[in-house]
Amino acid sequence: MATLNKELLKSGFKFPEDLQVQEFPENLPERVIQFGEGNFLRAFVDWMFHQMNKNKLFNGRIVVVQPIAEGLVPRINEQDGLYTLILRGLKDGKPTELKEIISSVSRGINPYKDWDAYLKCAEDPHIEFVISNTTEAGIAYEKNDSLENKPPVSYPGKLTAYLYHRFRHFNGDAARGMVIIPCELIDRNGDNLKRIVLQLSDDWNLPEEFKKWVKEHNIFLNTLVDRVVTGYPRDEIKDILAKLGYEDELVDTGELFHLWVIEGPKELSERLPFTKVGLNVIWTDDMTPYRTRKVRILNGAHTSSVPAAFLYGLETVGEMMDHEVMGKYTRQIIYDEIIPSIDLDKGMLTEFADSVVERFQNPYIKHYLISILLNSSSKFKTRVLPSILEYKKLNGKLPEKLTFSMAALIAVYKDGHVEGSAMKTMREKGEFTMKDDLPALEFFENVWESFDGSKESAAKVAERVLANTAMWGEDLNNVEGLAEKVGDYLYQITKDGIKATVEKLI
């Protein structure tokens, strides 16, 4: 079987009819340097640049930099940057699958093996945009990083070295500053990256003129990205390749939904005209409402509905949404309690919530509830607790199902015993392993040890959990009625079981 590359495109090979294939001129300049060659960027950003190129609105390619020593660059170069992307999900309620060969990537560079090729990119006047996704830990300050390292250890270190080389090559030309667009999932990612670049510039005693150039002529944008990317489809790859008719070691899969919120000057939308090809990219001067919407509705719906669904005996988000009881429970949480807790335009919130429900029902994605339960206590604090508190503030009472979800979360840890860095515990369906921060696991084990099955004992469990300021950032016993309600729900769960309690609740 032939391998996907430029030669295959030119060979007259008969591609499947349901696969989009489009060749571009080979002389398109490299205009983007991208740190990260993984599944997410290839199914999100690189796909977007491909759509603009198809419509002759960008006319440029991406050179990909491998952020760690081992990665996909050899395969990327073997395939001339080409790969097959399969996007799947529900569209207007119908299962939909889109297949396309993406050709926006020109080549890959491994800076650990070819540092000079990496720096050469800084000398290219056409390259004006930086994209990155080096995991949440990638935008981090490494005190011992050094410009003498080839390459520096951290992503910010590599970027600082790149910018300094560019500054020197172009003699500090203001027109040669970069537009830097990180996609890492941390709050204010652009602001944090800029701060670290300037800190490293101080550490490395780089000239004041360089630091001034970074501050005044390079634009660091804050962003929010949203698309579930399921990556290389190992379980299906034989069938997929048989249908495609060629070898591709870089096949990537993801959902249809996508959203990119970019906080920055509107004039940049002309240089990066994503919206002109119908992409769901929002340019804004304040991304806070969009972040609130995503964290509270998408992430919050997961975190608040999954504990009860898992205890109920379900395994995936799809099962949860299709279930007569738990599907109704999840929708009531979203529309009746989370949306009324957010003081933003209800139309914007409802439109996003509708897309979330459709995404949760995606038949192509198996999202396991046990993986969503990972580190649940810290997730609950940021994703669900604000909705509980704001709902009470706006409506004068506690939200019933979100309050119940807190009790369900506490119940997940019942009967648990910490072994190593995890907890072995039970649900009606049998034993499972709960993973969380070790202090959280030990705390919950200790809290449940004194439970004797009585209503008073359930109330004490609730009070002790809510009093954990290290977990919640405050003593939640001070929230009127919360401890009493959580205690009552805990007692019902332990006495009547999760199924009877949820069915009564909805």
Image (cartoon, rainbow, N blue to C red):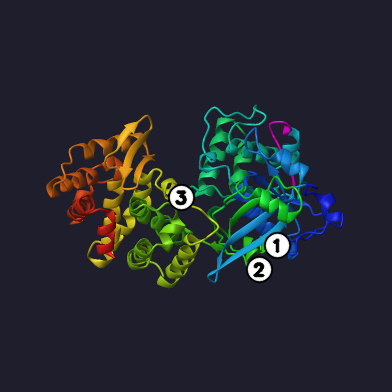
Q: Look at discs 3 and 2 and give the one toward the viewer.
A: 3
Magenta segment, which residues? Answer: 106-115
Residue nearest the viewer, comparing 412 with 227 = 412
Image vertical order of residue 198 relative to residue 14, above or below: above
- Residue 459 shown in magenta: no
Q: CA distance from mark 3 to mark 2?
A: 36 Å
Which amino acid, by three-letter code, is at mark 2? Lys
- Residue 52 badge: 1
User: Could you tell which of marks 2 and 1 lies nearer the N-terminus?
Assistant: 1
Q: Residue, x 51% and y 43% (percent of image)?
A: 136
Residue on which the image places disc 3: 368
Which amino acid, by three-letter code, is at mark 1? Met
- Residue 114 shown in magenta: yes
Residue 59 x %, y %: 76, 59
Is residue 41 something one can see in this rendering? yes
Task: For label 3, count other residues whose C-alpha is less than 10 Å away and answer few (under 14), some (14-19) or many (20+).
Answer: some
Is residue 399 something one can see in this rendering? no
Do labels 2 and 1 touch, CB within 8 Å?
yes
Q: Callout 2: helix, strand or loop?
A: helix
Which amino acid, by three-letter code, is at mark 3? Tyr
In which quadrant will I find the C terminus? bottom left
Q: Residue, x 34% and y 66% (percent of image)?
A: 332
Residue 21 x %, y %: 76, 60
Q: CA distance from mark 3 to mark 1?
A: 34 Å
User: Could you tell which of marks 3 and 2 lies nearer the N-terminus?
Assistant: 2
In this picture, residue 286 sits left or right of residue 13: left
Residue on which the image places disc 2: 276
